[in-house]
Amino acid sequence: MKPKMLRLAFLSLFVLSLASVSYAQPALIEVRDVHVKPGQIAQYEAAIKESIAFRQENNFPFAVRAFQAEPDHYRYVTFLGDWDGRDTIREWFAPIVTGEPPDFARAFSEATVSQAVSYERSRPNLWHNPEDPPVTLNTAGAIHELRLYPMSHTIRQVADLLERFAALYEAQAVPGSKFVWQQSVGSDLPMFTQYFPTADAASYYAERAAAMESMGSDFQALLQELGPLLRKIENVSWTSRHDLTYLP
């Protein structure tokens, strides 16, 4: 592979820029989904682990948490803070991408089928995050993602309902956390996504059933209001890959 292509592959390990995005929002994450060739997963993971060491050696400033949904589908969540974080990443890369790319860039490029990037901003008024939850992001074996896709004219109504859900969770002292983010840039807008940290994929469903039972008819009433406001719902279970996660 030509050096220029390797530099591009190396850059895509960390960030896919969207030059058209220039406005500022607080509490921003970059979500990068990577599909890997089935026969090259070991090669791919080895390249990612080398990239983590590279980040550590060069003081990459942002945490990047790794998850896996299918054997060939990985997700990396970079905690940017705000849109200025993208500029910080570009500055960090500036002296690197102009030189010879690291060896692991070739393995990464050869093993990757495709990548897609989106950006989500936090909606803490819609969160439920008890003081001492049984599972945190640091201890979770899995994260369950529940995506809600409003119609274009029902975004505000869905947000209002999610706030009422959060109040109900609080009133019933549901033990587990629920984090809500709203996608700002992506391929299928509008979308709210809810993240539930859990011990493992199976635990989510038991915890969800217990929470729904404790909230009873009030929860069911909110669900009935929510349903007609959505064009679709998606559920994805992500296994936490702490071994592929970078924490500065």
Image (cartoon, rainbow, N blue to C red):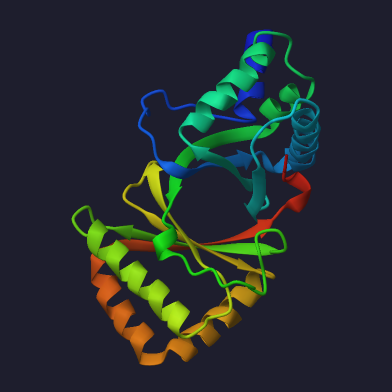
Q: Quadrant of the N terminus?
A: top right
Q: Toward the viewer: 200 or 155? A: 155
Q: Is residue 27 left or right of residue 1?
A: left
Say how many tags the image has: 0
Image spot of residue 174 (x, y percent): 53, 81
Q: Is residue 76 left or right of residue 187?
A: right
Residue 205, image quadrant: bottom right
Q: Quadrant of the C terminus?
A: top right
Q: Is residue 73 left or right of residue 55?
A: left
Q: Toward the viewer: 122 or 30? A: 122
Image spot of residue 109 (x, y percent): 67, 26
Please name the residue shown 33% across and 47% down the image: 189
Q: Is residue 103 left or right of residue 90?
A: right
Q: Up-down: is 189 above or below 97?
A: below
Image spot of residue 120 (x, y percent): 44, 46
Please name the residue shown 35% across and 46% down the image: 188
Please name the residue shown 64% across and 37% down the image: 62
Q: Up-down: is 5 above or below 58?
A: above
Image spot of residue 197 (x, y percent): 61, 65
